[in-house]
Image (spheres, rainbow, N blue to C red):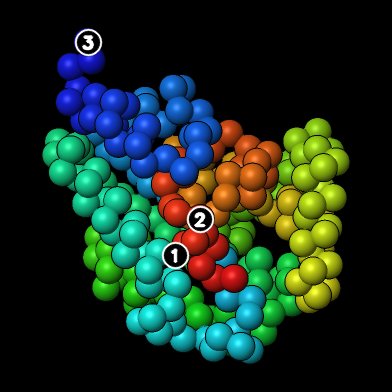
Amino acid sequence: MDSDQGIKWFNCSFYPTHKVCRAHRLEDGVIPRLRQEDVFFFSPWGPRYSFEKRGRIIRPEDKEVQTLQFLAGLQKEFRAHFSNRKWRWLFLGADLYGTKINNLPSDAVQEYFSSLEEWVCKLIPNAEFRLWSDYDEEVEKYRRIAREKLRELVSSSIAQRAQLTASRMGRGGNPTDYLAERLAEAMLIEDRYRPIKVSVVARAKDAEVDHDLPRLYFVPTDLHAPWL
């Protein structure tokens, strides 16, 4: 029997009943990292692509707030059942995906993430918020690796899906740059933080491009990708 009551709760009660799809690297990633004294959650967050219609500022009735409220409840449960852990949760605003890859106006992206940071601080006060551009210089070596190994790490079906998504968005985005950036992000975040990713998108959206990041999927489908 496992002597860690938090792990027993997670394995026997919380994970089986709350998952919306199976985790990635549950046994060799998620569980060992939940056993550590310091547990690090990571949730990347995209820019608001439909800012012309939805605006640049997050309002109380918006989907972003509902998603953050759900995640706040999730954290509360984990803290209650892992009382002997120290928790960190990094929300990463994917600003460069909007400006450099999908040609969004930088002021629209900046205003949106400023608004998001306010809501994160309000609803999950102990969480951290950073922008992907904060890591821009550090990530360059990972970008080179990702570009060199792109065909090895990303299947043709994932590449085709990225191409289709870029076409549907209609902003002239570069799907190859997007795939390489996702891989580079996963590599850097894994090396720097060794986190558990709590994803706010469908599992298929993370396949391959999140590389080896251990991942959990608890967010309901109707709250997926609230920035879209």
Question: From mark 1 to mark 3, how far is it between C-alphas?
Answer: 40 Å
Q: Tell me: residue 200, above or below residue 100.
A: above
The tag earlier along the polypeptide, 2 or 1, is 1
Name the residue beneath numbered marker 2: 221
Q: Tell me: residue 74, above or below residue 170.
A: above
The percent position of residue 113, horizontal first and vertical second, equals: 48, 76
Discs 2, 1 touching: Cβ within 8 Å: no
Label placed on residue 1: 3
The percent position of residue 68, horizontal first and vertical second, equals: 36, 64
The percent position of residue 73, horizontal first and vertical second, equals: 26, 56
Q: Residue at x 58, y 44 (%)?
A: 203
Q: Tell me: residue 112, above or below residue 209.
A: below
Mark 2 nearby-residue class (10 Å; few <14, some 14–19, many ≥20) = few
Q: Where, quadrant-wise, is the C terminus in this rendering?
A: bottom right
Residue 83 quadrant: top left
The tag earlier along the polypeptide, 3 or 2, is 3
Mark 1, secondary structure of its residue = strand
Q: Residue at x 57, y 66 (%)?
A: 46
Label placed on residue 130: 1
The amino acid beneath tag 2 is: Thr
Question: From mark 3 to mark 2, how far is it between C-alphas?
Answer: 34 Å
The amino acid beneath tag 3 is: Met
Mark 1 nearby-residue class (10 Å; few <14, some 14–19, many ≥20) = some
Discs 1, 3 touching: Cβ within 8 Å: no
The amino acid beneath tag 1 is: Arg
Label placed on residue 2: none
Residue 36 quadrant: top left
The tag earlier along the polypeptide, 1 or 3, is 3
